[in-house]
């Protein structure tokens, strides 16, 4: 079912980075509410089409880079260090509860897995 929906919107999906699919991408492509977009992503994870990921962003205004990504929300440590800011002599140690954690999704290419096995 979900794969058929994705096929209809393939052009827009092809232009989306398969390693960083945000709820907003799905909302925009399918012209649906954010609530429905979150639901579609959740179903896609259950069906093995997408993988849920978490990116921790640096809070320094002149950095704002992704410090590290995690596969599971519970794997995010309580403190984290931005190596870029450390090299630049800025504040680099942060409590993760003070940082922006961005949820996104990654496309799982089942056909590629079949070819390698």
Image (spheres, rainbow, N blue to C red):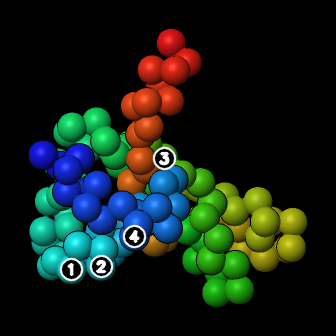
| Residue 76 falls left or right of residue 36 | right
Disc number for residue 31: 1
Decide: marks 2, 4 in contact (CB < 8 A)?
yes
Would you call the spot at circle 2 few (<14 residues within 10 Å), some (14-19), or many (20 or more)?
A: few
Is 26 left or right of 58, judged from the image as shown?
Answer: left
Q: Do labels 2 and 1 touch, CB within 8 Å?
A: yes
Sequence-earlier tag: 1 or 4: 4
Q: Residue 50 or 113: which is nearer the viewer?
A: 113
Residues at badges 4 and 3 in contact (C-beta under 8 Å)? no
Which residue is denoted by mark 4 in the rendering?
12
* Disc marking residue 89: none
Per the image, label 1 sits on a secondary structure element best described as: loop
- At a point 78% along the width and 66% down the height, the residue shown is 84
The residue tagged 3 is 70
Q: CA distance from mark 1 to mark 3?
A: 29 Å
Q: Which label sits in the foreground, 4 or 3?
A: 4
Question: Callout 3 environment at 10 Å: few (<14), some (14 to 19), or many (20+)?
Answer: some
For the question of whether residue 46 can be seen, the reply is yes
- The secondary structure type at the circle numbered 2 is helix
Question: Horizontal and vertical percent for residue 114?
Answer: 45, 20
Callout 3 secondary element: strand
């Amino acid at each position: 079912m979900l794969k058929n929906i994705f096929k209809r919107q393939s052009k827009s999906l092809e232009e989306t980075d398969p390693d960083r699919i945000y709820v907003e991408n799905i909302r925009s492509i399918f012209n649906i509410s954010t609530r429905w977009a979150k639901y579609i992503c959740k179903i896609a994870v259950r069906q093995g089409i997408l993988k849920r990921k978490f990116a921790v962003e640096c809070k320094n205004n002149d950095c704002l880079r992704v410090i590290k990504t995690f596969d599971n929300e519970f794997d995010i440590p309580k403190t984290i260090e931005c190596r870029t800011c450390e090299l630049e002599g800025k504040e680099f140690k942060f409590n993760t509860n003070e940082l922006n954690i961005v949820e996104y999704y990654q496309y799982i290419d089942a056909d590629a897995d079949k070819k390698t096995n």
